[in-house]
Each structure stands twice: as C-alpha cells, then as structure tokens.
C-alpha cells in the first residue's frame, strides 16, 4: 500500500508499506483526517496539550526561529520540522544555521548536494525529508524521472558516471558509516578536496535530520 500524498510519483520511494502492515502510529505532528480529529486538535490546543509541532506563543527565541524561517523560505506556514525542534530552542538555533550554510553559502554544486540528500533520505526511509527535497532537487536540474529512479540508480541510464559516484558516496556513508579509499579518491578527483569536505559534512548533517525526523515521526504538512 502506498499513501497518496498527491505530490508526485517519487513519494512512493519512501512511503511504501508492506501489505498487511499498518503504518506506525505517529508520535508528533499527526495530520488529522477526520472532522472529529480536527475538533479534538482544536480542543487540545486550547488546553495546552497539543503536539510538539503545534505553533503557539513561546519564548522570544522560538518566535525568532519562526520569523527567520518564514523570511528565508517564503512558505505558507512554519514547517513541522521547525516546530518540533523549536521545543529545544538552543538546539534549533544551532541546527538550522548549519543547514542554511549548506543551502546558501557552500560552493558545492547544489545538484550534487541534492543527489546525495535524496539518496540518503531514500535509504533511511525518511518520507518527510525526501518529499520536501523534491522541489529543491528539481530546481537544481535533477529531473522527475531521475528522482523516481534514485533507488535503482546503479542500473539506470539516467545518471552519468559522475552522478553515480556521488550517489554511491552518499549511500555508503549513510548505510556503512564509511567509504572505501578508492571511492573517496574518485569523488575527490571529481569535485576537489574542499567540495568533498562539504559533501561529506552535508551527508552527515542530513543523516542527522533524517534520523530525527524518523524518530519523531514528523508528518508532512497538509499544504
């Protein structure tokens, strides 16, 4: 069974659930789908027992996080991942600037970064991270067909040999926790030492984010 998120075929890469199994219950950020659930959500918000992902008045540092997010990304609302991590404001204030570095300041080719992020999100079954990076990846020039075939990339004719090296690097670092010397040298020759350091750090950063998203079972926003 595949949950219909009405976003794109690529979401199926991360949301497949074996037949006969129910999707695990969500710990935070549940997106209610019935009228009764929505009523309950409103009542809980009034008495202060709502989820980690509720957007509500808080310390000044939380308000600052929300305002910065709104200003930087021009989104309709504060993403659930921001709302969840804002429950630990000091953590959030350290995490998000590092992500901003990779997205805005690093000179690593954004397309290569997104190939790595899509790969690790897919391998870690992180639906939230995978889906949220689809428009980012497309903006860097990665096609929808490539996104849909990121899992079987090794046999796909849609990726260049250089692309496959980057994907393999992200895959091995994510699943094995290391890369062999030959692969490291090939990627280093391809993008240079400085960019390799940024690529490695970016993979580590989004591994951390994916594992947080999975542990908290953060749901996609309903927008």
Image: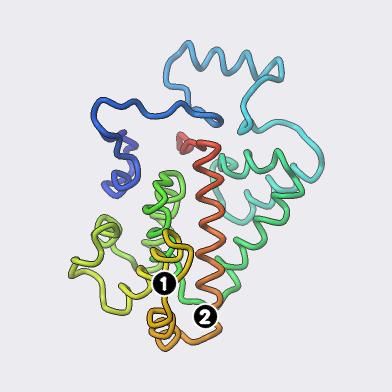
Pointer 1: what residue?
A: 112
User: Which quadrant does the N terminus fall into?
Assistant: top left
Instruction: Count residues near mark 2 (Cα–Cα under 10 Å), then give few for <14, some for 14-19, many for 20+.
Output: some
Task: Report whether 35 appears left or right of 42.
Answer: left
Give the mark count: 2
The residue under the point 33% across, 43% down is 7
**Circle nearer the N terminus (2, 1):** 1
Numbered mark located on residue 162 in the image: none
Q: Position of residue 213 (x, y in %)?
A: 52, 43
For this view, does 21 lie left or right of residue 37?
left
Quarter of the rendering occupied by the C terminus: top left
Residue farthest along the top direction in this orientation: 36
Disc number at residue 195? 2
Q: Residue at x 48, y 36 (%)?
A: 219
| Percent coordinates x, y for residue 54 in the rendering | 63, 30
- The residues bearing labels 2 and 1 have C-alpha atoms spaced at a distance of 10 Å
Residue 108 percent location from the top left of the image: 50, 77
Q: Mark 2 and 1 residues: CB-CB less than 8 Å, in contact?
A: yes
On screen, residue 22 above or below 149: above
> Circle 2 sits in a helix, a strand or a loop, which is it?
helix
């Amino acid at each position: 069974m595949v949950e219909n998120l009405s976003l794109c075929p690529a979401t199926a890469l991360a949301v497949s659930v074996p037949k006969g199994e129910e999707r695990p219950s969500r710990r935070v950020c549940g997106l209610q789908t019935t009228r009764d659930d929505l009523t309950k959500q409103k009542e809980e918000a009034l008495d202060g027992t709502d989820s980690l992902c509720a957007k509500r008045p808080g310390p000044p540092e939380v308000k600052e996080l929300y305002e910065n997010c709104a200003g930087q990304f021009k989104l309709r609302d504060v993403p659930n991942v921001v709302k969840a991590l804002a429950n630990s404001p000091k953590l959030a204030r350290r995490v998000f600037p590092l992500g901003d570095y990779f997205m805005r300041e690093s000179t690593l080719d954004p397309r290569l970064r997104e190939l790595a992020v899509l790969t690790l999100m897919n391998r870690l079954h992180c639906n939230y991270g995978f889906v949220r990076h689809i428009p980012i990846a497309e903006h860097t020039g990665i096609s929808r067909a490539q996104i849909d075939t990121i899992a079987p990339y090794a046999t796909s004719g849609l990726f260049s040999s250089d692309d496959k090296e980057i994907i393999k690097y992200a895959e091995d670092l994510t699943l094995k926790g290391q890369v062999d010397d030959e692969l490291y040298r090939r990627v280093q020759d391809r993008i240079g030492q400085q960019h390799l350091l940024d690529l490695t750090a970016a993979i580590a950063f989004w591994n951390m984010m994916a594992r947080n998203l999975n542990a908290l079972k953060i749901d996609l926003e309903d927008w």
